[in-house]
Image (cartoon, coloured by chain):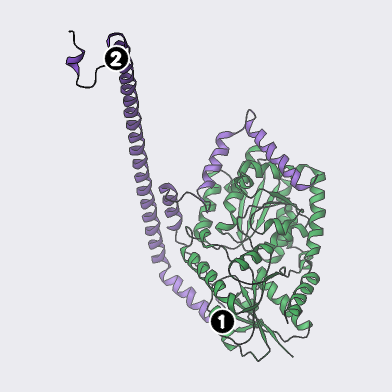
Amino acid sequence: MSAVHQLLPVFAGGDAIGHHVLHTRRVLREAGFESEIFVEEAHPAVRRHARHYRELRPRPGDRLLYHLSTGSPMAAFLAEQEQPVLVYYHNITPASFFARWEPVAAANVARAREELRKLASVTRLAMANSEYSARELRDEGYAEAVVVPVMVDFADLDAEPDAVATTRLRRAAERGGSRWLFVGRLAPNKCQHDVIGAFAAYRALFDPAARLCLVGGTTSPAYRRALVQLADELGVGAAVELPDTVPFPELLAEYRAADVFVSLSEHEGFCVPLLEAMHCGVPVVARGTSAVPETVGDAGLVLPEGGTGKDPVVVATAVRRVLHDAGLRARLVAAGRERVARYSLAETGRRFLEVLGAHG
Amino acid sequence: MPPAAAVDEIVAEARALEAAPGFPREAIEAVRAATGWMAAEATPGDVRQAAQLVVHQAGVPVEPQLWSPGPLRRLVKQAVHRLIGWYVRVLAQQVKALGEATARLGLAVAERTERLQSEAAADRAALSARVDGLSDRLARLEALAADGGAATGPAPGPGDAAASGPR
């Protein structure tokens, strides 16, 4: 039996890449392949699923699938292997986003891009989570790059939300005011500062009781501090919540309580939370940069890519429209559910095996 | 209506809102200014932006992540934290104060540079106006001399005062 082993630098478990890797292993095993996960670092919660990459002993005929999103010595290790290397590109945030805030992270992503370039010559099959990421692969010298969407089990989102969080959010809703939500790591490329700016404009123009919740761990502590200060400076500090990462049942409560999902990211390789919001029936307002238009399609209000798309008055007006135009809201919610169906686990798993089979 | 068409309408609506009386222009401009400096494409070489960044970078988190997968490591981390926490806090305050002082220095330099630039620009404008005035005056004098020359003969050349004197 041939094997397709997966390798990834950091196995966090709870993030989109971690889930994707676990789903991929299941799909591979169900299709009759041997499949193990090899990592450089693993979060304790998922450590039992993985082994250190130096323990990898591939046999002739095995294939090695590398998940590339950050810099790692694994890239050099893979380049030395005789077995065919497959790359799944989750995208690398350009270093320019971190240069001012986290110079060390900027150096890491710059190194990752260099490794991406070097792996091009030894890669048998390159897959990417979006056409946007596939274009980047082609630009970096990959002869062919195929889009295979990230595997997400949206059924997980139908679980019971955290009861305490649900009660807290229901009480907050009873006090009036709409609730904005964005889910994603606090990082300069996600532009949470623009979300806070647009939210401040929305409160000044339309709804002084509105609230904003920015769920996500911190990539840059300096950027996080700047966000807290920005909210205070704009007089909305008490209305902006930055709860960091939250347990999954609490995240479900946040999705259920949200009136609108607002993403003003400047760089996204795919952006799973957009689809999660759609699955939960939350209408999406997003700035149409990088892979966002591809992910959202016509199931959300996609604002222009340039400065207009992040202008606080434009974003605030868009949110007001979504919240007060019942027809538009219903259409977006229905289109969102249809959109998510295109990314169902069965569909993405089938696509992955199809691509794998076609490239023998 | 497809979402794309709604977006065009929304952009137009936002522009109309901004042009309407009673629009809170000052508050919105404050939002634009406060978020602008945080953008990735913020102006390179802007001293004010750089000074603001110093303040944020100088904040040292004194409550680190004490969680570890192994109980022994967790205990060691907690013990070290208890032993040196008070000192780290003092250091963090010092670093923060240094950051704020550096930022103030940066802002003072920026203000002084801006004032000097503004004074130099005013001087340049005054000088330019004076040169323009002199040029006009010269042109008027030349025209006058040409008119006089047409009536009495060729206009005098520079340093040709004797030639233009009475004969």
Which image quadrant is residue B151 in? top left
Q: Chain for mark 2? A: B
Which image quadrant is residue A45 in? bottom right
Circle 1 crowding by C-alpha within 10 Å: few under 14, some 14–19, many from 20: some
Q: Which chain is green?
A: A
As helix, strand or loop, the secondary structure at mark 2 comes to: helix
Front one among A345 and B103: A345
Indicate the quadrant containing the N terminus of chain A: top left, top right, bottom left or bottom right: bottom right
Using the numbered discs, state the Cα–Cα distance from disc 2 to disc 1 in whole angstroms: 86 Å
Q: Chain for mark 1? A: A
Which image quadrant is residue A43 in? bottom right
Point out residue A301 in the picture as x, y percentages from the top left corner. 73, 49
Front one among A88 and B69: A88
User: Tell me, what hue is chain B?
Assistant: purple
Residue A231 can be seen, yes or no: yes
Q: Residue at x 67, y 45 (%)?
A: A210
Q: Residue at x 77, y 72 (%)?
A: A351
Question: How many callouts does the rendering have?
Answer: 2
Q: Marks 2 and 1: same chain?
A: no
Point out residue B157 in the picture as x, y percentages from the top left corner. 24, 20
Point out residue B97 in the picture as x, y percentages from the top left corner. 38, 54
Q: Amino acid at mark 2?
A: Ala
Q: Which disc, if any, is residue A79?
A: 1
- The residue pinned by badge 2 equals B145
Q: Amino acid at mark 1?
A: Ala
Front one among A135 and A96: A135
Vertical relation: A317 (above or below) A85 = above
Indicate the quadrant containing the C terminus of chain A: top left, top right, bottom left or bottom right: bottom right
